[in-house]
Image (cartoon, rainbow, N blue to C red):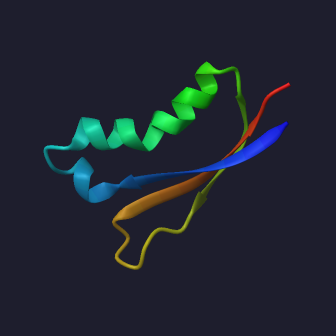
Amino acid sequence: MRKAIVVKLDVNDLSGRNRAKSSEEALSELNQHLAEGWQVVNSCPMSGTSHKMHSVGIIILEKN
């Protein structure tokens, strides 16, 4: 079985006091799937917003 998830990171939060929380929230869904035995098959960056303050990527996961 395969599934795709989108990981979004707000770059504004990384430069402020919310750095650790922002990183954790951006990766929490991915980390949950990895803990459940899913494996990353592929990942690709996607364009951010018009003001380029978000980093967005798509990750393809697979579980046998």
Q: Is residue 20 left or right of residue 3?
A: left
State the image coordinates of residue 5 (x, y, percent, origin top left): 63, 48
**Residue at left offset 46%, top offset 38%:** 27
**Residue at left offset 71%, top offset 27%:** 38
Which corner quadrant of the image does residue 62 belong to?
Answer: top right
Instruction: Please count the marks in the image.
Output: 0
Quarter in which the N terminus is drawn: top right
**Residue at left offset 70%, top offset 20%:** 37
| Image vertical order of residue 52 relative to residue 15, above or below | below
| Image vertical order of residue 62 relative to residue 56, above or below | above
Quarter in which the C terminus is drawn: top right
Q: Give whichever of 5, 11 is nearer the camera.
A: 5
Q: Is residue 33 left or right of residue 10?
A: right
State the image coordinates of residue 13 (x, y, percent, origin top left): 24, 52
Q: Residue furthest left?
A: 17
**Residue at left offset 26%, top offset 48%:** 14
State the image coordinates of residue 19 (x, y, percent, origin top left): 24, 42
